[in-house]
């Protein structure tokens, strides 16, 4: 799966997503794009999934006709996210195109 990390998604998470091709918005030069433009660009470039920590994304964007799946991590803390990598990996491995899923990060 081709995955894009939004700003705020801890980059070390990519090492845990074995079998997936992970880029960051920063690496692609897209860190200044607004959410709607970022989603448009990611879909045009063939990304299957956006991983973000932006809890407001679903309220700010119309996600109804999106092909890209979206996973929202409900924490930006790498130590907390690291403890929940198995949950995140499972969500990513089972998500379908166009789906939206929030991942609660246990402390």
Image: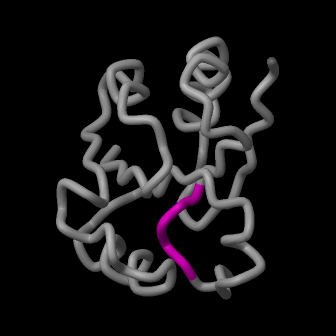
Coloring scheme used? one colour
Residue 44: x and y in percent read 27, 79
**Whether residue 27 can be seen here:** yes
Relative to 5, residue 19 above or below: above
- Residue at image location 50% in from the left, 78% down from the top: 35
Relative to 6, residue 66 above or below: below
Residue 68: x and y in percent read 48, 67
Q: Is residue 12 magenta?
A: no
The segment highlighted magenta reads: 66-70
Give the camera-side residue of 39 and 2: 39
- Residue at image location 64% in from the left, 12% down from the top: 83
Q: In this view, does 46 lie to the left or right of 5?
A: left
Q: Considering the image in quadrants, where does the N terminus appear?
A: top left
Residue 54: x and y in percent read 64, 60
Q: Main secondary structure of the magenta part?
A: loop
**Whether residue 49 can be seen here:** no
Relative to 25, residue 103 above or below: above
- Residue at image location 45% in from the left, 36% down from the top: 10
């Amino acid at each position: 799966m081709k995955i894009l990390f939004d700003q705020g998604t801890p980059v070390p998470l990519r090492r845990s997503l074995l079998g997936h091709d992970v880029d960051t918005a920063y690496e692609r030069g897209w860190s200044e794009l607004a959410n709607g433009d970022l989603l448009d660009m990611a879909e045009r470039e063939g990304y299957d999934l956006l991983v973000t920590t932006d809890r407001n994304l679903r309220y700010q964007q119309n996600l109804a006709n999106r092909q890209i799946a979206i996973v929202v991590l409900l924490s930006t803390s790498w130590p907390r996210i690291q403890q929940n990598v198995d949950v995140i990996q499972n969500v990513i491995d089972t998500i379908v195109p166009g789906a939206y899923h929030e991942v609660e990060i246990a402390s």
